[in-house]
Image (tube, rainbow, N blue to C red):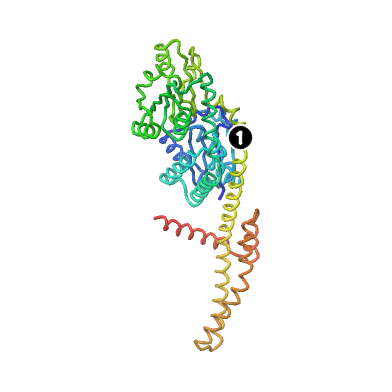
Amino acid sequence: MSVLAVGLSHRSASVSLLERTVQSDDGVVKLLADLLAAEHVDEALVLSTCNRLEVYADVPKFHGGVQDVTERIALRTGVSLDELADHFYVHYEDRAVQHLFSVASGLDSMVVGEQQILGQLRTALQLAREEEGVGRTLGPLVDAALRAGKRAHAETGIDDAGRSLVSVGLDLAAASITDWAQVDAVLVGAGSMSSLAGAQLRRLGVGRLTIVNRTPERAQRLAGTLDADVATVDQLTDRLATADLLVSCTGAVGLVVGVEAVAAALAQRPEKPLAILDLALPRDVDPEVRALPGVTVIDLESLRSVLDGADVARDVEQVRRIVTDEVGAYLARLRSERVAPTVVALRARAQEVVDAELSRLRSRADLDERTSHEVEITVGRVVDKLLHTPTVRVKELAGEPGGDSYADALRELFALDPAATEVVTRAAVVVEAGDDE
């Protein structure tokens, strides 16, 4: 396995650049097809979210893999490679595994600890499987990363970071509000972040709350839990005409709240200010809205410095320890699996020698059936005992960094045919494929 991770995220690129690289489901499928057609990509998975675009690939060569992946990202996003180059990060082998586990655990998210990334990664894996983009390398790797992410959320309080973001964002966006019972709030979106925002608004005692979402069924479900009203996207301008606060946090590609809609709403209430909290990435609210008189806009860019100072250090450290443990266990298991074909080939070679020598003995000595059987069992036991310690130890040592060298030593010392271990590996692939059917 040679896993390569290439991507850009909120840590390496501006919001405006990330907005230009966001891919729809159809775009992800097309990018997968481009990657799988590349010379140096054997498997591929694309993780496209509101704040990252990453490709995980199994590649035979590092430099060839990096070139193939970066060129196809540039081609599919329409952003030149020259412009993207300074914002790409590249991780390889163990570091790629470490990065993926950190992403799955929420450590690499703008909102540290957010759970949505687990669903997004699971969806990316499912899509890659449907497109036959993952096999025995990326499939088990992503499954292990998802398990690490679930453990991080189950064993720590990292989920509280998302609540901190919403709380701080609302504090900044509505700094002039003194009586929440008089506030008319509009919430655009019906996902996990919207649920957090809605719950926080209810805790603050907001007077009126309206949910706006493109999918009426989702809006109704969230409204039912928050005792809120429901409005369609077409009714947004009318609702803003009376609103004091707009909170938007959708996963849409493209702007959701346009400057024309906000301007039309303000024209109906010229003396009434409007606070807007945009928690989406890509942003939901047109940047030109900032220039409208009486409007205050707080977005994720505005919150970056606040997020950096959030008091989640203890939980983050706990998650980091979990990630370290899970990555170590996964890599040890992987190295042990890598040496397995060598162990099987060694035992097969020993059996060949035993069979040959027993055949020679039978041709030279007149042994009855019982004696021949006893000799066969005895010789087999001797060989098993001689091979037991080195085969057990090579599996143990393979779990350590550099453990592959012990398998190499076995192949050299016993003059094992490289083709023999390859046959064992191919047989394992066939068995795994059969189990999946």
Q: Locate residue 184: give its quadrant.
A: top left
Quarter of the view holding residue 377: bottom right
The percent coordinates of residue 215 (x first, y second) are 35, 31
Q: Between residues 167 and 267, which one lies in front from this camera angle? A: 167
Give the image location of residue 410, x and y in percent: 63, 63
Count of labels in the image: 1
Q: Is residue 146 above or below residue 206?
A: below
- Kindly identify the amino acid type of the residue bearing the numbered disc 1: Asp
Is any part of residue 228 visible from this angle? yes
Residue 78 seen from this side: no
Q: Is residue 338 above or below residue 200?
A: below
Residue 6 at x, y percent in the picture? 55, 38
Res 106 → quadrant: top right
Query: In percent of the image, x 40 and y 15: which residue is there?
Result: 265
The residue tagged 1 is: 311
Name the spot of residue 100 as percent of width and height, x first.
Answer: 55, 43
The residue that appears at 59% across and 41% down in the rendered structure is: 315
